[in-house]
Image: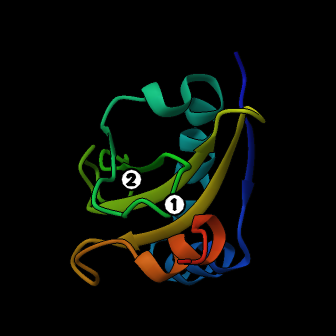
Amino acid sequence: MTFNIGSVPEFDKDLKRLSKKYRTLDSDFETFQKALAVDGPALVGVVRISGLGENVHTPIYKARKFYCQELRKTRSGFRVIYAHVCAENKITLLEMYHKNKQENEDKKRVFKYFGEPSP
């Protein structure tokens, strides 16, 4: 089963900003994206994010094991946040950050794209 992969505009900005600092990030991300298209949420090193509340019905995942050639290790410190829309067999990339610069995912961004307004 192959997954269709898309991204939100903020994700593209995150990737562009990080690529300026880490030269190999674009090619490393391409490799990650190919693995994600095949394995989806079953990818090794991926955990489902909990605590988003009852207004988020789409499963949101965090990839913790992201290989970066420049840093030469499987746990490079990069985090990729994405949503898996099961009905459409689609993965939407939401955020990419380095764990030294940001502690957790941006919940406002998750709610912006996958949250339902509170009654």
Q: Relative to residue 107, is residue 116 drawn left or right? A: right
Q: Position of residue 3 (x, y in %)?
A: 71, 31
Q: Position of residue 15 (x, y in %)?
A: 58, 72
For mark 2, what is the residue? 68
Mark pair 2, 1: CA separation:
7 Å
Q: Count the labels in the image.
A: 2
In which quarter of the view is residue 87 placed?
top right
> Which residue type carries mark 1?
Thr
Q: Position of residue 111 (x, y in %)?
A: 53, 74
Residue located at (56% from left, 84% from top): 17
Residue located at (64% from left, 80% from top): 10
Q: Which mark is residue 106?
A: none
Of the image marks 2 and 1, the number of the one nearer the N terminus? 1
Q: Which mark is residue 24?
A: 1
In contact (CB < 8 Å): disc 2 and disc 1: yes
Q: Relative to residue 104, is residue 33 drawn left or right? A: right
Q: Relative to residue 3, is residue 11 drawn left or right? A: left
Q: Toward the viewer: 68 or 102? A: 102
Q: Toward the viewer: 73 or 117? A: 117
Q: Toward the viewer: 112 or 34? A: 112
Find numbered disc 2 in the image and state the secondary structure of the residue it sits on.
loop
Q: Is residue 64 above or below residue 99?
A: above
> Which residue type carries mark 2?
Cys
Neighbourhood count class around disc 2 (C-alpha, 10 Å): few under 14, some 14–19, many 20 upward: many
Q: Is residue 110 above or below residue 16?
A: above
Residue located at (34% from left, 29% from top): 44
